[in-house]
């Protein structure tokens, strides 16, 4: 498929503008580009066909099964989109008069109230634009808390080895030294390793619970108690909140602050660079350190993004919360856990679970045995799934499991989809013994086969050049 720039025809347009009936004004030369931007010139017909063709090459939840572990690729109800498209929401401007922003503020206040109740927090901000941005904001709360108390010696953040990669990156960006601690044989935090890492220089702990191998840490109350006794704070990575929302609250586990991915747990669109919303909640003693909008009247406010963040994402999340209600939220979490355990049970006996026990919302398969016997890797199985109409699971994560495939089916998939996925995965397992060579070169039926992913990551080509 050609790039849109390659389809460009000089002079071709898709609009007919009336003659200008007001005095024209030009920018001074100092503010004007030396060259015109190299924008594609196309007819409306060609533009429509181009993006329709692109759409056909994209796999979304609306196309088929999308078991991307730790990403919660659930279906986003259309009613959420309809609410966000209401003119009163879509057309509001954050700098409009206060009386015109009352509805917008009510949405933010109501969403904050509900999310505080779900998480056990006291206050909430919607400024962060994504999950990692929410992490950054949450860890800055911890930093500000210690700095305000003059406790400058607390320079270290503890991160388990099963954590999302953004956790150590966030801690480092906030100026902390990262202390990595190993997991125990059960996939949970090793309490002895935690005790050894704690000290007067501990600023806090970043933890996901359930963790990235899909296990709820049975020692969570002891973990947060130990960190607090050492003078540190506990940060909850809400990436896996979908498994426990409405069932158990991070605030009751002993966490002091949390970020949530509204674009995951609360069924708003995500992927493709956004928009997202990494809402951050905290206990009352951290409220003074939360970022405030530029609309706030008090002096000295700080911001991590303009105004109140991606407002229309919050509208979608609130619509989802209102639709499910107090009974539906925990039911969704329970169904997510049920679906993950059902799919794992269907695969047990063929594949090897990394931790063969009841899981939460996701589970990890260890394909190291299959690779040793056949040479077929987790990557080969994942790429082969594409030809079967299934999006690959998360590969090679968490790092504590070699040849890992992490599957998260979410609650919005029916038993027929799960049965089909299990059948396909079992078929690929047997194919590894019969025709490993074809799996090494999969996918075979897609516009793109296997790009050089290492080269693409290290030397990405992000801008088209007319050569």
Image (cartoon, rainbow, N blue to C red):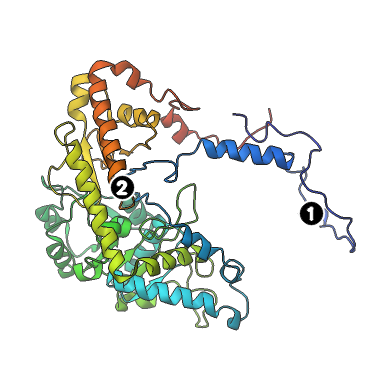
Quadrant location of the C terminus? top right
Quadrant for residue 394, please give it: top left
Q: Secondary structure at mark 1?
A: helix
The answer to whether residue 269 is above or below residue 396 is below
Q: Quadrant of residue 381?
A: top left
Quarter-of-image position of residue 318: bottom left
Residue drawn where x is 16% and y is 34% of the image: 352
List the residue tagged with mark 1.
Answer: 30
Q: Could you say which is closer to the camera, residue 10 or residue 144?
A: 10
- Image coords of residue 238 (percent x, y): 31, 59
Q: Could you tell me if residue 320 is visible in this image?
A: yes
Q: Which residue is mark 2?
A: 414
319 left or right, relative to 412: right
Disc 1 vs disc 2: which is toward the camera? 2
Q: Are marks 1 and 2 in contact (CB under 8 Å)?
A: no
Secondary structure, mark 2, is: loop
């Amino acid at each position: 498929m050609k790039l849109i720039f390659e389809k460009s025809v000089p002079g071709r347009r898709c609009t007919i503008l009336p003659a200008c009936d007001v005095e024209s004004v030009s920018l001074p030369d100092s503010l004007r580009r030396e060259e015109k931007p190299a924008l594609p010139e196309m007819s409306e017909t060609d533009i429509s066909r181009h993006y329709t063709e692109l759409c056909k090459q994209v796999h979304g939840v609306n196309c088929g099964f999308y078991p991307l572990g730790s990403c919660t690729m659930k279906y986003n109800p259309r009613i959420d989109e309809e609410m966000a498209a209401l003119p009163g929401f879509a057309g509001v401007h954050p700098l409009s008069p206060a009386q015109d922003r009352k509805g917008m503020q009510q949405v933010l206040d109501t969403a904050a109230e509900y999310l505080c109740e779900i998480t056990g927090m006291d206050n909430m901000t919607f400024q962060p634009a994504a999950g990692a941005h929410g992490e950054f904001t949450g860890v800055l709360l911890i930093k500000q808390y210690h700095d305000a108390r003059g406790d400058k010696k607390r320079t270290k953040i503890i991160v388990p080895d099963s954590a999302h990669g953004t956790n150590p990156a966030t801690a480092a960006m906030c100026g902390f030294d990262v202390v990595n601690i190993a997991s125990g044989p059960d996939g949970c935090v090793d309490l002895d390793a935690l005790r050894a890492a704690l000290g007067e220089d501990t600023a806090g702990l970043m933890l996901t619970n359930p963790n990235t191998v899909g296990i709820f840490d049975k020692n969570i109350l002891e973990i947060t108690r130990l960190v607090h006794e050492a003078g540190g704070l506990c940060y909850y990575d809400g990436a896996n909140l979908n498994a426990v929302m409405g069932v158990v609250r991070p605030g009751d586990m002993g966490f002091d602050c949390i970020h949530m991915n509204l674009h995951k747990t609360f069924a708003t669109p995500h992927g493709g660079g956004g928009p997202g919303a990494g809402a951050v909640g905290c206990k009352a003693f951290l409220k003074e350190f939360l970022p405030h909008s530029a609309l706030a009247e008090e002096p000295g406010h700080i911001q991590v993004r303009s105004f109140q963040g991606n407002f229309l994402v919050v509208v979608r999340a609130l619509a989802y919360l209102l639709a499910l209600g107090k009974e539906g939220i925990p039911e969704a979490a329970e169904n997510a856990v049920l679906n993950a355990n059902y799919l794992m049970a269907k695969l047990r006996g063929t594949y090897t679970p990394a931790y063969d026990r009841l899981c939460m919302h996701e589970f990890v398969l260890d394909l190291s045995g299959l690779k040793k016997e056949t040479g077929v890797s987790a990557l080969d199985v994942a790429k082969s799934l594409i030809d079967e109409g299934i999006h690959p699971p998360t590969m090679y994560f968490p790092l504590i499991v070699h040849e890992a495939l992490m599957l998260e089916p979410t609650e919005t998939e029916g038993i027929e989809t799960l049965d089909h996925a299990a059948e396909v995965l079992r078929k690929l397992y047997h194919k590894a013994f019969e025709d490993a060579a074809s799996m090494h070169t999969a996918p075979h039926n897609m516009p793109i086969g296997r790009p050089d992913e290492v080269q693409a990551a290290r030397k990405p080509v992000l801008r088209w050049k007319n050569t």
